[in-house]
Structures are given as structure tokens and as C-alpha cells.
Amino acid sequence: MMVAHHEKYADDGDALGYKERVAHIESIRTGATCYMIMCLASDTTESPRRIKSFNDRDIFVGGALLEQEGNTYIELADRFAISKIT
């Protein structure tokens, strides 16, 4: 899964969401576990995007971070039902 599109935001000092994402990536690099909820955008060309729907049944666990063509990706290492949390 792509977690950061660096080129798109490289010159945008006001992109607070991007800055937060870079901080998350650094936390993962230093050992933090990454949990993800999968969302579907209403329109992927819209900015900011609006959530059309999301997977309310599963939590996804991130694995290794990968750098490719200037972007950061994370492997999906695991998936479990949200019901296991409660």
C-alpha cells in the first residue's frame, strides 16, 4: 500500500496531513506497529478526498516499509477482525 507520495507534496510546506504521515513513517521505521483501516475515496482526483466507505470489519497490520520511485509503501503483514479487539 502506498503510504506517502513524496514528489506530490515535496514543495507544499502547508500540507499538514503529509507532515503527519512522514512522522508516522518515521515512527514505523523506529519500531512502532502500524495499524490501518482501508477506505474507499468518493473521487480519487478530489483534494481533499472524501471517504465513500471503509472496511468496518477488519484491521490491517503493516509490515516492511519499501521505497520505490520516490514513494513509500508498506507491506500488508496481517489482517484481523475488529471484533477481536473488544
Image: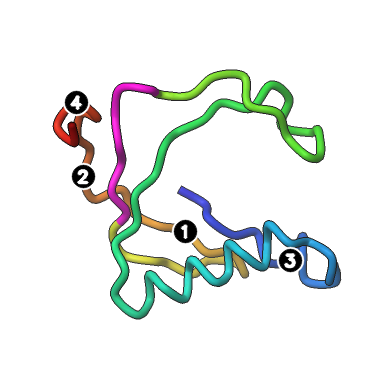
Q: Quadrant of residue 64?
A: bottom left
Sequence-wise first label, 4 or 1: 1
Q: CA distance from mark 1 to mark 3?
A: 14 Å
At label 1, the amino acid type is Tyr
Residue assigned mark 1: 73
Relative to 31, say whether 51 is above or below: above
Residue 67, compared with residue 50, is above or below; it is: below
Q: What is the distance, in whole Å, between disc 4 and disc 1 at their CAs?
A: 27 Å
Specify which label sits upstream in the sequence, 2 or 4.
2
Q: Is residue 82 above or below residue 12?
A: above
| 78 relative to 2 in the view: left or right | left
Left or right: where 23 falls relative to 12: left
- Earlier sequence position, callout 3 versus callout 2: 3
Report how far apart the C-alphas of labels 2 and 1 lie in the structure: 15 Å
* Occupied quadrant, residue 85: top left
Mark 2, residue position: 78
Q: Please state the horizontal and vertical placement of residue 65, each as a whole percent of the image.
A: 39, 66
- In the picture, the disc for residue 83 is 4
Mark 3 secondary-structure assignment:
helix
Mark-to-mark CA distance, 3 and 2: 28 Å
Dot 3 amino acid type: Glu
Q: Which residue is mark 3?
A: 7
